[in-house]
Amino acid sequence: MRVLIAALVTLAASAHAFCGFYVAGGGAELFNNATQVVLMREGTRTVLSMQNNYQGPPEDFAMVIPVPVVLKKENVKTLAKDIFSRVDTLAAPRLVEYWEMDPCYVEPNYPEEESRSYETGAMDDEPMKKGLGVKVEARFSVGEYDIVVLSAKDALGLETWLKQEKYKIPSGAEPLFRPYIQQGMKFFVAKVNVKKVTFDKSTGMAALSPLRFHYDSEKFDLPIRLGLINAKAQQDLIVHILAKNQRYEVANYPNVTIPTNIDLVPSAKSEFPFFYVSLFDRTLKANPKAVITEYAWQASSCDPCPTSPMSEEDFQTLGADVVPSKGKVTDAYDASQGYVLTRLHARYDKASLGEDLVFRAAKPIVGGREFLKDGKSLEQGSRPDSLNNFQARYAIRYPWTGPVACKEPVYGRWGGPPANKVDEGVKAAQNTAFVPRDPAKVEKLAESSIAELQVKGLKTEAGKPLRKTK
């Protein structure tokens, strides 16, 4: 995620997970506190883009990431930082405000339309070093990163090699190396030249240039267990996946969608992030070890939109330029057609995580839209459909308080603000791993019931006005 403001950093008892780990030079202790991953998948081609921040003294350090193949220089590039903020904002849980229309307003008689949501828019091989079973398969530089790709015969040898290269390996690394070595994985080591990095003097934090690399593999997974080496406590991991006409979920952990279409009390406008982390934690408690789907939508559209949908340039930046399609690489126009953006959110610690995340294709779902099922009640939760239109959406609804001067008023119709109110737009909940957590926020701020969590709320049904009794 984006660089975090200093006030939130001091509150962080948790950290965003990293699909590798940091090893520091000079005996320094480092921990990673914010990572965002975007994966593009087509056939056997995976394009992995990630942005990381780190906090610690400005000595050289490296990121160690397991990869299935030897990466060459042409497989690796750096990206502009703003692409991650755009993707994160587009798929983040969102809060909207609706005002009830005049119950006596008569709508124009437009032709009927389908009542559903729709789009709006290497070098020569080096010999084994000192009999440790470690081989440098490739070496090159990209941006501020000096990169080596290693293979290893045993975990202890890899740990020893890194120590001989003057990196302090956190205790407990060797057992975590072992399964990757047994699978024949390589190790992508990106060493940072801190002379090319700007540090924030007040926080000691640096935002590194995002890295993107691609490879071909039958298996579609994300190695995250090594990130536990740097874990202080629980970690949050948010993964965005872009794929043509396809949503993804995890194959080796339970899957659940976040409760959505919940009406909130007006005071939640200033407490939305606190409500959301409470809702997330309660959902995870009800579904232990689950990975939670927060978004699955066509990437070139949104409704409501906390930012503009992804552009042709965004798709190219995140991998469409190296993703084959029918025997050729997609051009910019083809790249924008049909991609689904899936957002998966996991929260875990060393005790609850046993395996890396393995992804599988999943059927389309919808939910979290201003859509009335049977023309009466707002849809709740998620359900299967022919396309992906699911989002974590929450609403503050302001009932009509003006005069009612007609015999047959129609209540429960919602729209934008009246002339005397300002539309502040859609609010996205971001950096939620660093928000103080209070389970009671769900009951305090939920106006409508949440069936999945047995929360009654002040009213039984979302989408209906709550009127004060006299």
Image (spheres, rainbow, N blue to C red):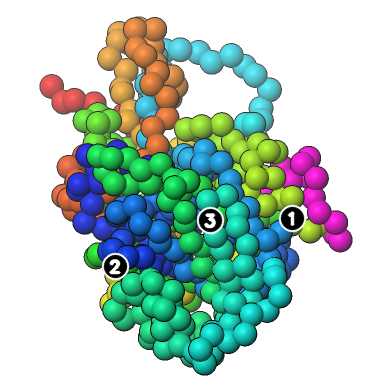
Question: Which labelled disc corresponds to residue 145?
Answer: 3
Q: At numbered mark 1, what does the secondary structure look like: helix, strand or loop?
A: loop
Q: Which residue lies at the image location 58% right of the left edge and 87% below the top edge?
A: 128
- Relative depth, front residue between 11 and 42: 11
Q: Amino acid at mark 3?
A: Tyr
Question: Which labelled disc corresponds to residue 351?
Answer: none
Q: Earlier in the sequence, mark 1 or mark 2?
A: 2
Q: Earlier in the sequence, mark 3 or mark 1?
A: 3
Determine whether label 3 and label 2 are within 8 Å by CB: no
- Relative depth, front residue between 38 and 466: 38
- Disc 2 packing (10 Å; few <14; some 14–19; many ≥20): few
How much space separates mark 3 and mark 2, taking CA atoms? 20 Å
Q: Which residue lies at the image location 53% right of the left edge and 56% below the top edge?
A: 145
Q: Is residue 431 left or right of residue 90?
A: left
The magenta segment: 326-343
Q: Amino acid at mark 2?
A: Gly
Q: Earlier in the sequence, mark 3 or mark 2?
A: 2
**Residue 290 visible in the current orientation:** no
- Relative depth, front residue between 438 and 117: 438
Provide the residue designation for mark 1: 322
User: Residue 460, relative to residue 221: is it above or below?
Assistant: above
Q: At numbered mark 3, what does the secondary structure look like: helix, strand or loop?
A: strand
Residue 252 x, y percent position in the rendering: 48, 76
Determine whether label 3 and label 1 are within 8 Å by CB: no
Q: Amino acid at mark 1?
A: Val
Provide the residue designation for mark 2: 27
Quarter of the rendering containing residue 109? top right
On-image quarter of the C terminus: top left
